[in-house]
Each structure stands twice: as C-alpha cells, then as structure tokens.
Amino acid sequence: EDSVSYTRSLYTFSIMSAASAMLPPKAKEVETDEASRIHRIRITLTSLNVENLEKVCADLKRGAVEKKLRVAGPVRLPTKKLKVTTRKSPCGEGTNTWDKFEMRIHKRLIDLHSPSEIVKQITAISIAPGVEVEVTIADS
C-alpha cells in the first residue's frame, strides 16, 4: 500500500511539474493576445482655440483612416461658455459701466475600434499647443 501511494504521489508530482513548465508560454500568449485585442477607445480633445482643435482632430482621423480602423467622429459637444461680468471702475464711483469676459471651451470626441498599440502610433502626432488629449480605453 505504501508503494502504491508513493507512485501515485510521484505521478501527480510529475503531472504538476509538467503543467507548471508549460505555464510561461501560455502567459506570453495571453500577453500578445491582450496587446492585439481590439478595444473601444475614446479620445477626448479639449481646447480654447477651435482652429487648433479641428487641426488635431483632422490629423487623428486621417491617421486612423490610413490604418484602416473603424472611426466615429469627431463629435462636436456643446461649447461651454464661462462668463464673468465686472465693474470697470475700481472705486465704484462714476457711471455704472461693466466689462463682460467670456471663455469658450470647445470639446470633441473621437471613437476608435483598434488594438492599443496602433492607437499609440496614431496619437504620436504633434499636438498643437493648448489642446488637451485624454485617451480612455474600454473593453468592447
């Protein structure tokens, strides 16, 4: 009975060691699958200058179309207008004259369906000053 249990434990040990020896290649395969897996990627662009924003959007879309990716956008979101009204006179005397200041924040969305590696290549373009880029990756 002792010899039977010893051979069973030896047999299970050899199976376990063979299984553990096979794990690293599987892990590498998973990593390559993860990198080449298609993600739903949302690029959010924000700027105060519309011309720079539209230029960056056009460059991103052109790069995505050249790589033959599914592209949606740019979607133009409503412009946020931040307004401040203040008196011109520093002391408060005199005619009631007012200054009105306004800051407009423009926002665009671009949706891509691609692997994350290709998005890194696309977003490596030169981005105009004053344009903020936010990349969000979601599983599709």
Image (tube, rainbow, N blue to C red):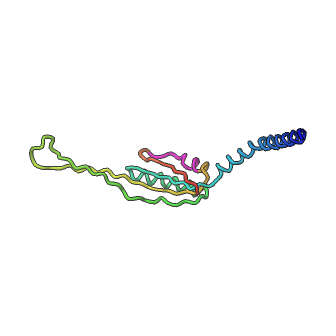
Residue 130 horizontal/vertical position (percent) = 41, 45
Q: Which residues are magenta?
A: 119-128
Residue nearest the viewer, comparing 24 with 39: 24
User: Which residue sits at x=71%, y=45%?
Assistant: 27
Magenta region, main secondary structure: loop
User: Which residue sits at x=49%, y=60%?
Assistant: 73
Residue 95 horizontal/vertical position (percent) = 10, 48
* Residue 25 located left or right of residue 138: right
* Residue 30 located left or right of residue 114: right
Residue nearest the viewer, comparing 8 with 100: 8
Q: Is residue 14 above or below residue 57?
A: above
In the rendered image, residue 120 lying in the magenta stretch gets the answer: yes
User: Which residue sits at x=49%, y=55%?
Assistant: 58
Residue 62 horizontal/vertical position (percent) = 54, 56
Question: Looking at the rendering, in which quadrant would you find the C terminus?
Answer: bottom right
* Residue 89 located left or right of residue 9: left
Indicate the quadrant where residue 76 lies: bottom left
Question: Looking at the rendering, in which quadrant would you find the N terminus?
Answer: top right
User: Which residue sits at x=47%, y=48%?
Assistant: 133
